């Protein structure tokens, strides 16, 4: 007794599943030698299931006759199974029910919710993109509301907070950005823009019609000897040795990028006797030799409190000396590495100003770590007491799950308020905003501030507070002659 292809398809589907069923139907239409090779290659499990099913149902002779009727025919006369057109599915009927019971509706299998589905549902809905949903603008309370959602597999769901709209940035896409990135890879240079996952990389590297591009080069490798709880830079007790060609490579790259302002920073190298200060100073001097018109800002570490090394870097020819206190004094032990302290950072900034009084000194604080208003006031007073000229405020954003969590997303109007307070206290300049980083738009902010201060003074008087180096003097003198 022969069995039809339709019945064979139903039997295979019921016992081995649809995918394996298709595979065995194709095997039955092959010559015997090819069929054996295929079975040896991994189809034996499905064949064993068919054999067990046929034996228990007393249908071994039926399957054998069906197999023989197909294999005995010449290849040209064998029926071609159109698997894609078969629309019947096996039903979950008892074993004593007829085999021919089929349904045109596949069995419904309830799949568990996935983390991907949860994240998808947590995102914006289609209605969010439809114009005309709301005619009136959102009130501030609604605009600043943070949306939360539960994501993850069942039993392990966790609450996540979507970033507020003021922290969204554009994807970098400009020829200047791509050129800078390719040059960095070719010269084996690193930037804190990439290593620290800065959200402003598109703006700074791309430049604009108003200002030249700004880049932040990270010297002495990409591995730090310290482990601050907010920073995503790699850490190790034994980082690779310094690259002796890095000062020349850095100067060569900057001289051909057409940058108006460059920020040099570095990882902490406590494994070196001088903390890398001599390497830092040599890089600044090489840059000034090849591109004397570039303004150079150095964002340095604390050199383990060695003030002689601080003075060495301050006198290397740079235009701005920056060292970040990062947060208020009360939170410093919980945010920064144990080898750093708020008071030690103050001593570094004070020593730089003492080594070169006309130098502009700069620092930065992150908001959203749990600081209080009184603690911020104390930090600003301490910075003004040592004549720090520039301060910046930015939102702390958690780089990975291994880093400390965000305590609060500070609203933009609060950043504006602290900017006003800092300027009233006598700071020369203050950049404050959710996406502001210590070197964000550094060139544009610095140059515009110097020009504004100079234009505000009488032609015969000069504000010594903003005089930095011969490069800035040339820049301002050229602007005044226009």
Image (cartoon, rainbow, N blue to C red):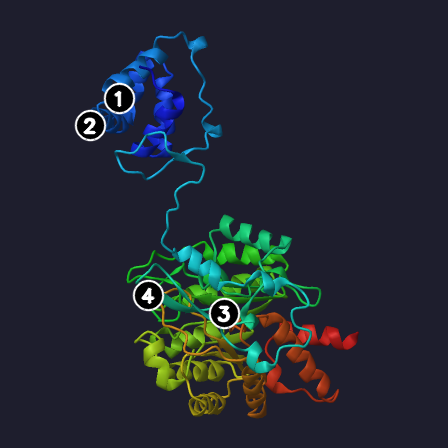
Residue under the image location 61 percent in, 75 percent down: 446
The quadrant of the image that shows the N terminus is: top left
Q: Earlier in the sequence, mark 4 or mark 3?
A: 3
Q: Element at badge 2?
A: helix
> Do the CB atoms of the residues marked 2 and 4 lie less than 8 Å apart?
no
Cα–Cα span, label 4 and label 3: 31 Å
> Could you tell me how far apart the alpha carbons at marks 1 and 2 are, in whole angstroms?
24 Å
Choose mark 3 or mark 2, whichever is in front.
2
Residue 212: image location, x then y, percent: 65, 64
Q: Disc 1, disc 2: CB below 8 Å?
A: no
Q: CA distance from mark 4 to mark 1?
A: 56 Å
Judging by the rendered image, the residue that carries numbered circle 1 is: 40
Residue 317 appears anywhere in the view: no
Name the residue beneath numbered marker 2.
56
Query: Would you name the residue on which mark 3 appears?
Result: 163
Can you name the residue that lies furthest to the right here? 482
Inter-mark Cα distance, 1 to 3: 55 Å
The span from disc 2 to disc 4 (Cα, nearest Å) is 69 Å
- 20 shown above or below 469: above
Residue 73: x, y in percent? 38, 8
């Amino acid at each position: 007794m022969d069995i039809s292809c339709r019945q064979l398809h139903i039997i295979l589907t019921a016992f081995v599943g649809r995918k394996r069923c298709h595979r065995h139907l194709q095997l039955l239409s092959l010559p015997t030698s090819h069929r054996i090779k295929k079975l040896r290659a991994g189809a034996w499990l499905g064949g064993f299931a068919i054999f067990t099913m046929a034996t228990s149902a007393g249908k071994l002779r039926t399957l054998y006759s069906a197999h023989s009727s197909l294999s005995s025919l010449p290849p040209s006369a064998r029926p071609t199974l159109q698997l894609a057109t078969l629309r019947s599915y096996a039903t979950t009927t008892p074993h004593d029910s007829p085999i021919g019971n089929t349904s045109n509706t596949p069995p419904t299998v309830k799949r568990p919710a996935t983390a991907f589905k949860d994240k998808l549902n947590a995102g914006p809905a289609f209605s969010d993109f439809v114009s005309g949903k709301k005619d009136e603008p959102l009130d501030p309370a609604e605009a600043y509301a943070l949306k939360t959602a539960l994501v993850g597999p069942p039993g392990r769901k966790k609450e996540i907070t979507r970033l507020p709209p003021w922290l969204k940035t554009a994807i970098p896409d400009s020829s200047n950005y791509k050129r800078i990135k390719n040059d960095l890879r070719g010269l084996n240079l690193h930037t804190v823009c990439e290593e620290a996952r800065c959200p402003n990389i598109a703006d700074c590297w791309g430049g604009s019609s108003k200002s030249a591009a700004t880049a932040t080069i990270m010297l002495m490798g990409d591995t730090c000897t310290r482990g601050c709880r907010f920073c995503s830079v790699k850490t190790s007790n034994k980082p690779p040795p310094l690259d002796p060609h890095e000062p020349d490579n850095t100067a060569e790259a900057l001289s051909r990028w057409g940058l108006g302002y460059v920020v040099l920073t570095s990882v902490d190298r406590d494994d070196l006797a001088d903390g890398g200060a001599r390497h830092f100073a040599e890089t600044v001097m090489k840059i000034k030799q090849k591109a004397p018109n570039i303004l150079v800002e150095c964002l340095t570490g604390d050199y383990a409190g060695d003030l002689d090394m601080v003075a060495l870097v301050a006198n290397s020819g740079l235009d701005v000396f920056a060292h970040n206190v990062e947060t208020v004094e009360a939170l410093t032990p919980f945010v920064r590495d144990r080898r750093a302290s708020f008071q030690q950072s103050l001593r570094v900034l004070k020593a730089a100003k003492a080594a070169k009084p006309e130098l502009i000194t700069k620092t930065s604080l992150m908001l959203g770590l749990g600081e209080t208003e009184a603690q911020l006031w104390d930090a600003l007073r301490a910075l003004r007491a040592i004549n720090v000229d520039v301060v910046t405020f930015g939102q702390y954003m958690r780089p990975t799950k291994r880093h400390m969590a965000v305590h609060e997303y500070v609203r933009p109007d609060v950043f504006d308020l602290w900017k006003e307070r800092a300027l009233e206290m006598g700071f020369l300049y203050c950049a404050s905003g959710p996406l502001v980083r210590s070197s964000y738009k550094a060139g544009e902010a610095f140059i515009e501030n110097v020009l504004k201060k100079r234009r505000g003074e009488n032609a015969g008087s000069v504000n010594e507070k903003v005089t930095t180096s011969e490069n800035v003097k040339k820049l301002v003198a050229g602007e005044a002659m226009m």
